[in-house]
Amino acid sequence: MKQVFKSSCPLNCWDSCGFEVTVENGKVVKVEGDKDHPITQGKICGRGRMLETKTNSNKRLTVPLKKVDGNFKEISWKQALDEIAEKMSDIKELYGPTAVLHSHDYANNGLLKNIDKRFFNCFGGATHLVGSICWGSGIEAQTWDFGSSDSHAPDDILHSQHIVIWGRNVARTNMHLFQKLQEAKKQGATITVIDPIYNATAKISDQYISIKPGMDGLVAIGIMKVLIQENKEDTNFIEKYTVGYNDLLELLNQFTIDEICSKAEITLSEIEYLASIYINGPTSTFLGLGMQRYANGGNTIRLIDALVAISGNVGVRGGGANFGNIQVGKSFSMNALALGDKKTESRTFTMMEQADGILKSIDPTIQMIIVTCGNPVAQVPDSTKIMKAFQSVETVVVIDHFLTDTAEMADYVLPATTVFEEEDIYYASMYHHYVNYGEKLVEPPGEAKSDLWIWTQLAERLGFGKEFSYTRDEFLKIGMMGLESEGITLEKLKEEKRLPLPVNHTPWNDMKFSTLSGKFEFTSELGSIKGFVGKPQYLFPVESEHTNPALAEKYPYQLLSIHPLRSNHSQHYVLIEAMQSVKIEVSEDIAIEKQLAEGDKVRIHNSRGELNGSVKIMKKAHPKTINVDEGLWQKFGGSVNLLTPDRVSDNGQGSTLYDCLVGLEKIE
Ligand SMILES: Nc1nc2c(c(=O)[nH]1)N[C@H]1C(S)=C(S)[C@@H](COP(=O)(O)OP(=O)(O)OC[C@H]3O[C@@H](n4cnc5c(=O)[nH]c(N)nc54)[C@H](O)[C@@H]3O)O[C@H]1N2
Ligand SMILES: Nc1nc2c(c(=O)[nH]1)N[C@H]1C(S)=C(S)[C@@H](COP(=O)(O)OP(=O)(O)OC[C@H]3O[C@@H](n4cnc5c(=O)[nH]c(N)nc54)[C@H](O)[C@@H]3O)O[C@H]1N2
Ligand code: SF4
Ligand SMILES: [Mo]
């Protein structure tokens, strides 16, 4: 018998879509969009649709594995859990809990995926990861400027006169914003795209501005200079609601327009065009995550925030500096779920520098790594170093659906359930403000178990089972505790499947900012307290001809590694054979210079590593630009992270993945 159920996409993505899932004879047979979802309205992408293939794939892990003499052997859950718990207990006694590293990313948007935090807190602590490879620089930057990183509601764009898509690959990564863009365009709004790659969003834009990677802050400075020259700054806002404006002016005076144009490789008329867009608002700015993955990433976002602020686009309908939307996640009672007070010890590594953290750890050295919702061997910068770090640790445990590059390096691999095999609620703190319900629809294959079950079993063996003696519903209710007064309960969510969370649809419209001063801060007090430069700055990327000419001569091309169209990071490559090889996309000037045709074999390299692959030519991309989509497994030809640096960004919280120079040679 066929039955259709409402469910939700768990993937780490802007859109957090609603699904309708067809189940026949205990098997998921189709995943489609839910037309009743208020935001996603029946449209989903191929990655979501492929969750059916993922769920039914015969490549899935279905039994616990243990590495014995270099080979994986199937073992029982009892043996796996007994042995892991015993090792954890010994490690805690001998070295303390921080000898265990919890390595993770955010591969699943389920609320109950946060139970891992509860587990490690009850264990007494652990070494845990801070900052984010993904969006760390930008979140920190907006926290300094506004007090938080909050976006306008999706429909607010329909109030915009102009829309600037600044380094976000909307058509590929944020499909429902793409739809809204088309709607806004029909109503007469203009769309401007600023990006080194002429992507599918650029194709529908009124104006495409090709920029040299890493130079966006400089362009923001140029626009602000023109705006102020024309006396178009919002003096009322600046005087009443900001601090540090003189520091901003001082910075603007350090650069001439000519210098800006030549270094960012854009024209004066493009800067003037952008200034006119910001002057004749309301103008909404959608900041992408690509342009903050540079050594200057935090300041890039801060300078664009400053531009949005002085042009009168903060707190107004149709405006906004839209980056993350972390007010969504803040709706949940995370500490009640995570029991932060239970930990007695703690140590942190940044997510970017986890390899160095492991290799250099002393007192205690890392004895065990537990990986959940992450594939660091493919996704974390400087793969060679990551592999060396993982190899150096006595015991590595990986919980996953597939035998990923990271799982291959493990001593224990534990098979996890996928979205349709467990109940959870899903949301993304990125774009819209709806929480979605997803019930358990089918039984997992073989012996696959939910992450929650695994933590509960380990907790029982380690003596804190009491903290895990709750049902899934009870845990969900704990996480939703703070929402009850808003009338948002688990029962209601189960009934209605989608509920709006209580967020501000026009952030900062009351002009009350959650910074220390209560104002918009061009000069950040929090930044200074944390030991960084609180004044706005322009810094050049670290790997560029402006900062390191010798390096730029040796490795003349900028390597980007943007998100793939058909995969969510590393998750879909195993399911799509056509994706299992390295594709190296080059700008047209590189193809001419190196006499390359599509399909030619080339090698890209730098001091960290190399990658061989076949050429594709990117039409209209900024000169000297190369892209290799991220996510490919090492075993399918190599992850682009073999080449990327593991430095942290200027505000200590983000990655510098795209701040990466390479050389290229044709190979026969
Ligand atoms: N298909 C697909 N969608 C996804 C994901 C996926 O893996 N696949 N991942 C999801 C996740 S976790 C995230 S974080 C988001 C990311 O969403 P996006 O921010 O849209 O994606 P990115 O691939 O990080 O990069 C975005 C854009 O930044 C541009 N860029 C790079 N450097 C610069 C620069 O210096 N200046 C400017 N102006 N632009 C620059 C790139 O050319 C690219 O067009 O996407 C989500 N959606
Ligand atoms: N070079 C380069 N590197 C990048 C990026 C880039 O742009 N360029 N982007 C960065 C960004 S934005 C992000 S967000 C990260 C993403 O990095 P990751 O989150 O590590 O990548 P994913 O491939 O999404 O997922 C990792 C693993 O989690 C598993 N998984 C999924 N759901 C579950 C679950 O419910 N339980 C368990 N236990 N496991 C699960 C998947 O099977 C997969 O193997 O990558 C970063 N790395
Ligand atoms: S991956 Fe993103 S766009 Fe695709 S179905 Fe999931 S939430 Fe929607
Ligand atoms: Mo991300």
Image (spheres, rainbow, N blue to C red):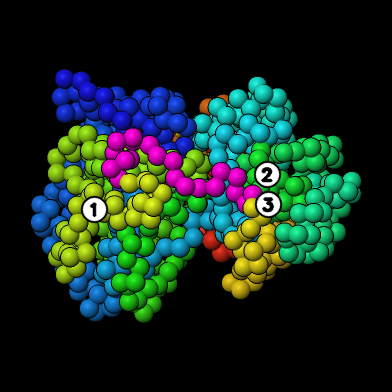
- Looking at the image, the residue that sits furthest to the top is 1
**Residue behind mark 3:** 305
Q: Which residues are magenta?
A: 490-509
Q: Residues within 10 Å of mark 1 (few under 14, many from 20)?
A: few
Eye-nearest disc, 3 or 1: 1
Secondary structure beneath label 2: loop
Eye-nearest disc, 3 or 2: 2
Could you tell me which quadrant the N terminus lies in? top left
- Three-letter code, disc 3: Asp
Disc assigned to residue 316: 2
The residue carrying mark 2 has its beta carbon less than 8 Å from ligand 1:
no
Per the model, the C-alpha gap separating discs 3 and 1 is: 41 Å
Q: Is residue 82 above or below residue 171?
A: below
Secondary structure beneath label 1: helix
Of mark 3 and mark 1, the one earlier in the sequence is: 3
**Residue 458, can we see it?**
no
Q: Residue at x 62, y 59 (%)?
A: 513
Q: Position of residue 582 (x, y in %)?
A: 46, 36
Q: Position of residue 284 (x, y in %)?
A: 67, 40
Q: Please give the count of numbered marks on the rendered protein.
A: 3
Q: Position of residue 58 (x, y in %)?
A: 22, 33
Per the model, the C-alpha gap separating discs 3 and 2 is: 14 Å
**Residue 75, can we see it?**
yes
Disc assigned to residue 474: 1
Of mark 2 and mark 1, the one earlier in the sequence is: 2
Q: Residue at x 29, y 52 (%)?
A: 477
- Three-letter code, disc 1: Glu
Q: Is residue 533 above or below residue 637?
A: below
Q: Residues within 10 Å of mark 3 (few under 14, many from 20)?
A: many
The quadrant of the picture showing ligand 3 is: top left
